[in-house]
């Protein structure tokens, strides 16, 4: 029973990683950049929702929507100001700029909201479903997290597969120049990609802080790195890959914490990543691009 | 003077770099002697030297070899822990501090090189972003390992355990690495002079390596891996050469850095440190050693200089970083600076 | 520098037909491909490729676009491992060799889309071709031991000597990436020659050249063969060049050899004409 309990917690944690990883993978697919500031957008989303709920006494769903709105605008703003001018620049330059944006977000949060950790309020954390005569407790937040992740995945797959904007996004990630020649507005497409990624980050932030209540300016950093790892694990640029990578990462981390050691769980997770990449150098679902000679 | 003009451009560049370092050392020593240095600046001298060496060594991997490494602080960590351990163990054997420091740095470098070799085997097979993420992973693994390591010694030799302290040392024994508590009671034997010497050694190794047959091969791998193979170059060998050399130098820097403090933990050498050094390298220019030195020194001093901004200083740092990256990659500004400085700045060569 | 330019050997004419001659030391081909093939997924890019190239022969490989010519080069240099067949270099099976090992065994190449070391100087590019013939290691380089100075001087001299084939000595310090297109192509050839091969593979060496440059290139290729006494296999679309200097020609279409022979035999071969111009053109 404890195994099943850990498995469910792992899937829930993995769902959070998957949602964050989606943002990384979509942005990488279209802009070929690793947005290191993504983890910090999660943090911003969590803070916005926190203040909406605790200071302004707004109902939780409103808080979530507000967080999504703010993060979406923030994501588009960052893309326009910091990343768009560097589209022709070497990828290392964009990486460093993303790091700068990350520092900017963390330190702004530090100034605005201080470094004292906040406790994210959530009634859903402590109540839940009891199965198997009370042997298996699943909190409501766990269920909501997993369901949310599934909904997002389905919605996103339908979006990229069937809508005009979705096709535009796929076109831009294959070949920006050709997409432009076909009349696709590349700037708008990229902005929308960042917008979706940021909105997802907000959702992830709220879900994460509902389950793991401490919130501080650096809260987004480690999950960001882990989700980035999950995206690469599953094959960077692949949406199903982000889901698979995120879920696997969450499950492996939870089991490592439970059965090996809490302190070494991170090491175990990263070690698994390395082993997988040795056998599948482009990630689990990634495509090996053969260089043309 | 005429003799200098007759030297090739690369040799003049090297001479300039050595000159700047030596001049800076002399000036700072004079200022220190005359009491013109604030205590905060004096305290930063050794860390600056360590960060300079870190930046130079990372430039070898990122600028000369052309591979992004996001776990460079891991090698600093290996060097720190092994070097400090060696220093503590040899405390009574080599009472003369500068010699003990030198031995410790060599030990740190050797262990870091070994770590580089072991990590290089899986890492260097990958390419681009995947290589980067695996270096990041290894950096975190190293941090995790040292955070959970217990190493002590007593009359029976070394006692080692992981996760929990099972070293069971006898009285008179000493716990060197204490898990998450790190290393404590360190005799602070690092000096600015030692740092200066390490920088010179690093420059010597890197310049001479780059301007030799092996360096050419490494740069060939960077510029066109397939063409390099087609002229008979063993790509894996030279990737490894650059990676291990870079790791060794970082290890020595880690030892120097650690012995400037009475205690330190593995968390000091984390992903943030790796990113910090990467910023030095990119801002200074890939392959540009003098640039790395200036960037590392300037950006380490900058937060101190921004002290007047108090709480806002890291924010200003972040904004400055973003603005500098936008400026240096703006095509208008690039052509402007090219016109001022004559020839376009050589991208990716090695100076 | 250890290996001097080879002594000129007596030129022995070697037929370039499907028949692989008896192994006779003087007449044995430098390269033999037997039933060479590679599949990419379901597609056979190269099928049952047979070819023998004489020790000092200038051979040509022609065919329409997409026929698989560069794929053959990639197979010879082990950029792809063949799925079928074997490659014998100077009688030795190249088996599971890597690209670097194949180069050390004696095959050098140029690329269809130029692959120079753009950020390095012209001279450094040539010195990289000389890499395996310069004898000092990493430590000698770092500590600047006497071997370093001796070998670097020798390699500099040798690089200049090689650059003089195309009168490029004055460009020695120029960055390779900033050279004009024609010079880049010539530099690639010099770099390949620097590796001291017994077989030189040239992939469309005359691409983008005007007739007078092409004529000069033709003379240079023959001069290279005569000076270095090596075999040259080239892929080309320029028929004047191919018919002008190739002693044997193989024609490839859809991954298979459709004709082999001397320039005269190929020129009038109806199968070849049909491959290039279609059925109507053959009539």
Image (tube, helix red, strand yellow):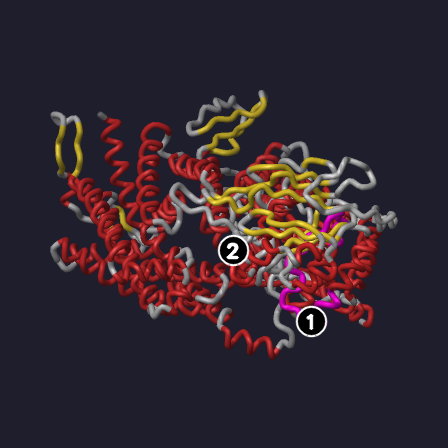
The image's mark for residue B278 is 2
Q: Quadrant of residue C95?
A: top right
What is the total number of numbered labels drawn onto the structure image? 2
Tell me whether the residue at label 1 lies in contact with that at label 2, contact meaning CB atoms closer than 8 angstroms.
Answer: no
- Residue B24 visible within the image: yes
Q: Is residue A2 left or right of residue B67?
A: left
Q: Chain of mark 1?
A: C
Q: Is residue C281 left or right of residue B313?
A: right
Q: Going 57% across and 35% down the picture, which residue do you hit?
A: B85
Q: Chain of mark 2?
A: B
Report helix, strand or loop for mark 1. helix
Mark 1 closeness class: few <14, some 14–19, many ≥20 residues within 10 Å: few
Image depth: mark 1 or mark 2 in front:
1
Question: Compared to B113, does C61 lie above or below?
Answer: below
Q: Nearer the viewer, residue B128 or B51?
A: B128
Gap between marks 1 and 2 measured at Cα: 50 Å
Residue C186 location in percent, x, y? 71, 63
The image's mark for residue C98 is none
Q: Is residue A267 left or right of residue A134?
A: right
Check disc 1 and report the residue beneath it.
C211
Residue C34 location in percent, x, y? 64, 38
Q: Going 62% across and 61% down the picture, which residue do you hit?
A: C237
- Residue B249 visible within the image: no
Question: Compared to B98, does B15 lie above or below?
Answer: below
Q: Going 34% across and 35% down the picture, which residue do you hit?
A: A252
Residue B175 location in percent, x, y? 51, 30
Please say whether residue C209 is one of the residues in the magenta stretch: yes
Question: Compared to B183, does A113 lie above or below?
Answer: below
**Which residues fall within the magenta stretch?**
C193-217
Residue A151 location in percent, x, y? 20, 48
């Amino acid at each position: 029973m404890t195994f099943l309990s850990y498995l469910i917690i792992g899937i829930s944690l993995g769902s959070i990683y998957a949602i964050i990883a989606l943002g990384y993978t979509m942005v990488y697919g279209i802009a070929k950049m690793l947005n290191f500031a993504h983890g910090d957008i999660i943090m911003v989303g969590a803070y916005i929702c926190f203040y909406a709920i605790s200071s302004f006494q707004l109902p939780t769903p409103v808080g979530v929507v507000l967080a999504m709105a703010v993060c979406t605008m923030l994501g588009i703003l960052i893309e326009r100001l910091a990343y768009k001018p560097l589209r022709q620049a070497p990828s290392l330059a964009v990486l460093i700029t993303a790091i700068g944006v990350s520092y900017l977000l963390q330190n702004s949060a530090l100034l605005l909201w201080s470094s004292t950790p906040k406790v994210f309020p959530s009634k859903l954390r402590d109540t839940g479903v009891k199965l198997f005569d009370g042997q298996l407790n699943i909190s409501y937040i766990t269920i909501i997290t997993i369901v949310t992740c599934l909904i997002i995945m389905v919605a996103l797959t339908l979006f990229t597969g069937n809508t005009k904007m979705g096709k535009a996004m796929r076109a831009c990630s294959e070949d920006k120049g050709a997409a432009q020649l076909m009349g696709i507005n590349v700037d708008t497409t990229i902005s929308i990609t960042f917008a979706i990624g940021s909105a997802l980050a907000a959702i992830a932030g709220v879900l994460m802080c509902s389950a793991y209540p401490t919130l501080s300016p650096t809260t987004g950093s480690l999950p960001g790195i882990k989700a980035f790892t999950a995206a690469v694990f599953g094959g960077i640029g692949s949406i199903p890959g982000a889901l698979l990578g995120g879920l696997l990462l969450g499950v492996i981390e939870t089991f490592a914490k439970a059965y090996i050691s809490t302190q070494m769980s991170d090491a175990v997770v990263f070690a698994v990543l390395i082993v997988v990449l040795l056998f599948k150098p482009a990630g689990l679902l990634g495509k090996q691009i053969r260089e043309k000679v | 003077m005429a003799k200098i003009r007759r030297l090739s451009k690369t040799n003049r560049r090297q001479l300039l770099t050595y000159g700047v370092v030596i001049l800076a050392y002399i000036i700072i020593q004079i200022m220190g002697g005359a009491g013109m240095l604030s205590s905060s600046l004096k305290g930063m001298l050794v860390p600056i030297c360590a960060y300079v060496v870190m930046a130079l060594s990372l430039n070898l991997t990122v600028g000369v070899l052309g591979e992004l490494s996001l776990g460079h602080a891991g090698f600093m960590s290996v060097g720190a822990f092994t070097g400090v351990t060696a220093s503590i163990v040899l405390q009574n054997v080599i009472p003369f501090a500068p010699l003990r420091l030198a031995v410790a740095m060599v030990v740190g470098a050797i262990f870091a090189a070994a770590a580089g070799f072991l990590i290089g085997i899986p890492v260097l097979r990958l390419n681009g972003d995947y290589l980067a993420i695996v270096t990041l992973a290894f950096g975190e693994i190293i941090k995790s390992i040292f955070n959970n390591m217990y190493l002590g010694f007593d009359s029976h030799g070394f006692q080692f355990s992981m996760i929990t302290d099972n070293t069971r040392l006898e009285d008179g024994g000493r716990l060197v690495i204490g898990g998450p508590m790190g290393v404590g009671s360190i005799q602070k034997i690092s000096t600015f002079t030692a740092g200066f010497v390490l920088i010179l050694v690093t420059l010597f190794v890197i310049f001479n390596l780059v301007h030799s047959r092996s360096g050419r091969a490494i740069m060939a791998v960077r510029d066109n891996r397939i063409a390099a193979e087609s002229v008979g170059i063993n790509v894996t060998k030279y990737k490894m050469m650059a990676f291990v050399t870079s790791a060794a130098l970082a290890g020595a820097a880690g030892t120097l850095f650690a012995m400037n403090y009475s205690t330190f933990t593995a968390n000091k050498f984390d992903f943030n440190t790796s990113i910090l050094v990467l910023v030095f390298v990119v801002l200074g220019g890939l392959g540009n050693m003098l640039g790395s030195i200036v960037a590392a020194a300037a950006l380490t001093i900058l937060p101190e200089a921004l002290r007047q901004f108090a709480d806002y200083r890291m924010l200003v740092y972040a904004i400055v970083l973003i603005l500098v990256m936008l400026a240096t990659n703006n095509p208008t500004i690039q052509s402007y600076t090219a016109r001022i400085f004559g020839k376009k700045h050589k991208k990716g060569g090695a100076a | 520098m250890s290996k001097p330019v080879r002594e000129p050997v007596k030129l022995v004419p070697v037929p370039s037909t499907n028949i692989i001659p008896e192994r006779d030391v003087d007449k044995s081909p430098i390269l033999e491909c037997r039933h060479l093939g590679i599949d990419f997924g379901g597609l056979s890019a190269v099928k049952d490729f047979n070819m023998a190239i004489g020790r000092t022969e200038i051979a040509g490989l022609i065919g329409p676009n997409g026929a698989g010519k560069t794929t053959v080069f990639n197979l010879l240099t082990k950029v792809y491992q063949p799925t079928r067949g074997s490659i014998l270099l100077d009688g030795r099976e190249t088996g599971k060799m890597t690209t670097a090992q194949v180069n050390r065994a004696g095959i050098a190449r140029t690329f269809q889309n130029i692959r120079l070391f753009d950020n390095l100087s012209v001279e450094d590019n040539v010195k990289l071709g000389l890499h395996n013939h310069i004898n000092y290691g990493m430590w000698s380089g770092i500590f600047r031991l006497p071997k370093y100075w001796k070998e670097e001087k020798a390699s500099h001299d040798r690089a200049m000597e090689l650059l003089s084939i195309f009168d490029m000595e004055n460009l020695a310090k120029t960055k390779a990436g900033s050279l004009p297109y024609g010079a880049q192509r010539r530099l690639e050839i010099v770099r390949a020659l620097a590796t001291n091969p017994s077989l030189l593979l040239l992939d469309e060496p005359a691409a983008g050249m005007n007739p007078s440059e092409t004529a000069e290139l033709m003379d240079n290729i023959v001069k290279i063969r005569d000076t270095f006494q090596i075999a040259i296999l080239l892929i080309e679309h320029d028929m004047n060049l191919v018919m002008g200097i190739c002693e044997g020609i193989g024609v490839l279409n859809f991954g298979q050899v459709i004709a082999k022979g001397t320039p005269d035999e190929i020129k009038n071969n109806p199968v070849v004409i049909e491959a290039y111009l279609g059925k109507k053109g053959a009539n």
